Amino acid sequence: MYNRMEAALETMKESLARWTKGGNLSQSSVPALWFFRENGPTEPTSAVYEPCVCLVVQGAKRVQLGTEQYIYNDRQYLITSVNLPTFVQVIEASRERPLLGLKLTFDIQQVSQMLVDSNFPHDRSQQSRHGMATSEITLPLLTAFQRLIDLLDEERDIPMLAPIIEKEIIYLLLVGEQGARLRQIAAAGSQSQQIARAVEWLKNNYAQQLRIDDLASQARMSPSSFHNHFRTLTALSPLQYQKHLRLHEARRLMLAESLDAAAAAFQVGYESPSQFSREYNRLFGAPPLRDITRLRQLAVAQ
């Protein structure tokens, strides 16, 4: 098994090296499949993870979610079951041995449908699980990803075969070490699913005023129970989650769309520029102008 795993990893390294020559993050011809490559360690960068599974076959990454950290390398995969604002950092990479990895996004509704169509055991535990975790990669999961990558050489087959392989990957995740985590999120009526719906609402409405009592009522929970389950799933309180989404998006707007701090603050829901600047400084370690200037200088240097 060890030799087969090593051979599978080497094959995938060759494939990803071939498909990531352009560097950074790129979407493949399979819409849900993304590749990433970095030629050296990076500063922590903002990223909102969507439901997905990520793996690296060379190098290592660190993801910080609230106060928790997740590190994964060529022996592990990272799975995310809800949208989570994070900081991501490449901690092991070089030009000779760049970070090589992939991301496959999925819709929790896909997982829910598989639960309906199958005889997976229901997770009756009412204890919420974190929305992010790492696990050891398995040979079946690695080879399924390789077959998905191989479709890129036969693009006419992608519409028919890619959904089948993606479904196989979700199945392997469901029967794997993190299966209970996915089943709990996808199971109709579960507390985790109710929290996941609240997370989805916040992601789409982060600029609106947050009313915890209303969200708790929609989730059919008391405010205190809602708060506890939300924090368990996301590692953040509902207010912190909204704040992180706002600040991450404001940072993106200033960096990618050249908005000034006041305009970015207003667009993401802040009424007070001074409050925005204080909270931005607290999260990113510098006020907006200094932070964006530094990020642009880093981009030029790289």
Image: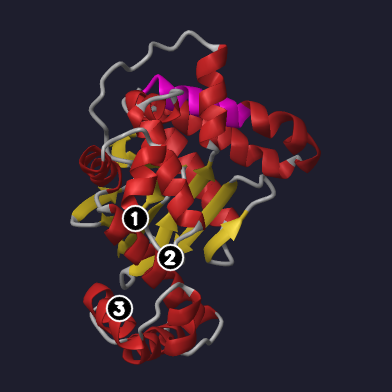
**Which residue in the protein does label 1 denote?**
59
Give the magenta range.
165-176
Q: Amino acid at mark 3?
A: Tyr
Q: Give coordinates of residue 87: x percent, y percent.
A: 32, 63
* Relative to 212, residue 154 above or below: above
Quarter placement of the C terminus? bottom left
Extreme residue in the right direction = 156
Q: Give coordinates of residue 192: x percent, y percent.
A: 35, 33
* Circle 1: element type: loop
Sequence-wise first label, 3 or 1: 1
Q: Amino acid at mark 2?
A: Glu
* Circle 2: element type: strand
**Front of the two marks 3 and 1:** 3
Gap in angstroms between the C-alphas marked 3 and 1: 30 Å
* Relative to 234, residue 252 above or below: below
**Residue neighbourhood size for the residue with mark 2, other residues' Cα within 10 Å, grouped as few (<14), some (14–19), many (≥20):** many
Identify the residue at horizontal 26%, vertical 50% (top origin).
Answer: 71
Identify the residue at horizontal 34%, vertical 64% (top origin).
Answer: 244
Q: Give coordinates of residue 228: x percent, y percent.
A: 21, 42
* Circle 3: element type: helix
**Which residue in the protein does label 2 denote?**
38
Is 190 positioned to the left or the right of 171 in the image? left
**Which residue in the protein does label 3 denote?**
280
Quarter placement of the N terminus? top left
Name the residue nearer the viewer: 165 or 98. Answer: 165
Gap in angstroms between the C-alphas marked 2 and 3: 27 Å
